[in-house]
Image (tube, grey):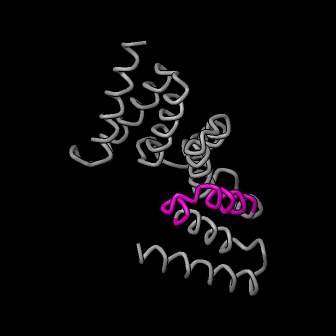
Amino acid sequence: MGDYEQALESFVKAFKIWRESLGEDHPNIGQCLSNMAGIYQIYDRKLEALDCLQKALIIYQKHLPTNHPQMGDLHNNIGLTHYILEQYDLAFEHLNISLKIKEKCLPPQHPDIAMTHFNLGLVYESQDQLEEALSYLEKAITIFRHALYPAHPTIIKVEQIIERVSSKSKIA
């Protein structure tokens, strides 16, 4: 874990330097906050991660077009954090925004689109909306199979989750 501690320390230093030299809402500050959020996620500090992501979103909204890929990634990460915090309505909101952005600016078989479908599938599963969950998970696996090699760990993971949701669906 030492490398992550070092990374977080470096991001915090960069954040302070950039904030002083570039101002509060420079895009580099947004990227730094997003990077810090990733480290906070690793350390299971979800509220701190969410705070960084929301601050990054405010900055990005000032500087990036609404359909920019970084906006899609940021909404995906915010949605995933809300999912982990069991704030499902907010998770749906941000993941759907992410999906719309990614579908506009990326090729249809891009793995980032698949990942957002996957995340939406997880949220639907957590709400016991199993048919909807399976629909998103199937979209995700179709894209992942196109974009990744057959034994890729992501494909294996998604297939396992599809099996789990299918089993739940048969019981319900």
Q: Is residue 50 magenta?
A: yes
Q: x and y percent of residue 15 in the render?
A: 66, 79
- State the residue in front, 64 or 157: 157
Across and down, in percent, residue 75 comes to 62, 49
Q: Principal SS element in the magenta part? A: helix
Q: Residue at x 61, y 60 (%)?
A: 49
Question: Would you identify the image quadrant in which residue 32 lies?
Answer: bottom right
In which quadrant will I find the C terminus? top left
Classify 53 as above or below 104: below
**Percent of width and height locating residue 55:** 72, 62
- Quarter residue 48 falls in: bottom right
Q: Nearer the viewer, residue 122 or 117?
A: 122
Left or right of residue 63: residue 5: left
Number of marks in the rendered image: 0
- Where residue 56 sits, quadrant-wise, is bottom right
Would you place residue 20 above or below residue 88 in this image?
below
Q: Residue at x 56, y 68 (%)?
A: 35
User: Quick one: 139 or 52, which is closer to the camera?
Assistant: 52
Q: Quadrant of the N terminus?
A: bottom left
In this rendering, position of residue 10 left or right of residue 87 = left
User: Which residue is the extreme one toward the left?
Assistant: 151
- What's the residue at 30%, 40% (across, down)? 145
Specify the segment rendered in magenta. Answer: 39-58
Question: Residue at image x 55%, y 26%?
Answer: 127
Spot occupied by residue 83 in the image (x, y as percentages of width and height): 57, 41
